[in-house]
Amino acid sequence: MPSKDRIAYFYDGDVGNVYFGPNHPMKPHRLCMTHHLILSYDLHKKMEIYRPHKAYPTELAQFHSPDYVEFLYRITPDTQHLFSSSLLRYKLGEDCPVFDDMFEFCQIYAGGTIDAAHRLNNRQCDIAINWAGGLHHAKKCEASGFCYINDLVLGILELLKYHVRVLYIDIDVHHGDGVEEAFYFTDRVMTVSFHKYGDKFFPGTGDVKDIGDREGKHYSVNVPLKDGIDDSGFTRLFKCIISKTVEMYRPAAIVLQCGADSLAGDRLGCFNLSIDGHSECVKFVKSFNLPLLVTGGGGYTKENVARCWTVETSILLDTQLPNKIPDNEYISYFAPDYSLKLQSGSMENYNSKSYLSSIKVQILESLRHLQHAPGVQMHEVPPDFYLPDFNEDEQNPDERVSQRSQDKQIQRDDEYYGGDDDNDND
């Protein structure tokens, strides 16, 4: 019988303490809810738990422009009135507001994805999870779609130091445009995004005809879907396209973005997936037994995000969970039935069989142009990015977090926000 996968899990309680604003749909508080649900099911006992290091500005500038990183570092809610032209240039505003501890928030979620890639590179785990990551819209020089730093691009750049080809898969309801754009001209990274597509749906990109360019031609795959896609249509298409992609591309590692806004009933979504349907994709990707980096992403009905990522953590651990949610600090959010599994809703499905079939045919035809995996001449592996010594009061990211310090860190009263009890069930 094969040995169990070694799973590294990254979490810092501070990541859930930031607040985008009273009317903003992005609630980092959902990460605390997810973590506590994972703890209540004792899943943490089957993983190695790490607190990520806070990514240094020089690390963030491996992808983002140094001037943009510097701006994020300097801007605060109290000083933003002094930076009106820079706010416009870097696209901060309504969708991407300036809030307290914004830069530290970026450092934590990006640090988690970089650390996850680092541990995979050094074969210290088989699967690495950072539910705080997956912010796929951020561009080299600008914020976009609630995303400031693109941790996924940074994690993939880290993986490319050791892996010839990396496959990126995105099941968020929104197109993974920032990651696709970053690697649009290279065959070292193949991006596959399943998303709602339409002129009036953010970000408005991701047509099936967008397949990459230059050396990257045919190495971008877009699966544009319509409202109401259900489990059977989504998973059938997913398995067909991903199995053919893996067969043709032969990636050395996979990055999977598990945006939960593709679930039924999401505040900003329009798909009709159950948690079983969403997590079936995670199970399928895991079955390839390749080094796997898993992140979160979108998801705007908090209790459903927590349910989804807890179930997907259990799938990565090959563990069955009872449907009744155990008592935990956020139990009231799961009333009235306190059940783990979310069923699909009764939305009308606008994805006809002929539409899904035509999408599949176009994508498989593009994949046939790959012929075989690209021959990448491997140069000497660049050294791991230099990090200055940690201060004594900062934790080494490779040090196991003790249960005592873990509990101390996660059970903070100030994780609750007075303005954060707006009804997310609508």
Image (cartoon, helix red, strand yellow):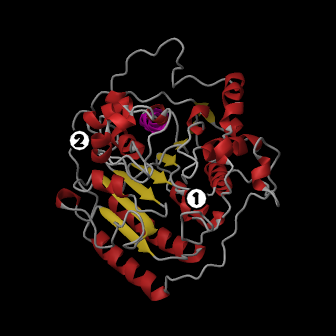
Asked if residue 181 is among those painted magenta in the image, a careful observer would answer: no
Task: Give the prevailing secondary structure in the magenta stretch.
Answer: helix
Asked if residue 112 is among those painted magenta in the image, a careful observer would answer: yes
As helix, strand or loop, the secondary structure at mark 2 comes to loop
Disc 2, disc 1: CB below 8 Å? no
The residue that appears at 56% across and 56% down in the rendered structure is: 299
Q: Nearer the viewer, residue 40 or 285?
A: 40
Q: How many marks?
A: 2
As helix, strand or loop, the secondary structure at mark 1 comes to helix
Q: Which of 26 and 196 is in front in this view?
A: 26
Q: Earlier in the sequence, mark 2 or mark 1?
A: 1
Q: Distance between the residues labelled 2 and 1?
A: 31 Å
Which quarter of the figure is the C terminus placed in? bottom right
The residue that appears at 72% across and 32% down in the rendered structure is: 413
Mark 2, residue position: 378
Residue 149 in sight in this render: yes
Seen as rendered, the residue at the extreme top is 392
Mark 1, residue position: 283
Q: Nearer the viewer, residue 201 or 77?
A: 77
Dot 1 alpha-carbon crowd within 10 angstroms: few under 14, some 14 to 19, many 20 or more: some
Position of residue 53 measured from the top left corner of the image (x, y, whole percent): 48, 27
Position of residue 3 measured from the top left corner of the image (x, y, whole percent): 61, 43
The residue that appears at 60% across and 60% down in the rendered structure is: 279
Q: In the image, which residues are magenta?
A: 106-121
Q: Residue 415 carries which label?
A: none
* Amino acid type of the residue tagged 1 in the rendering: Lys
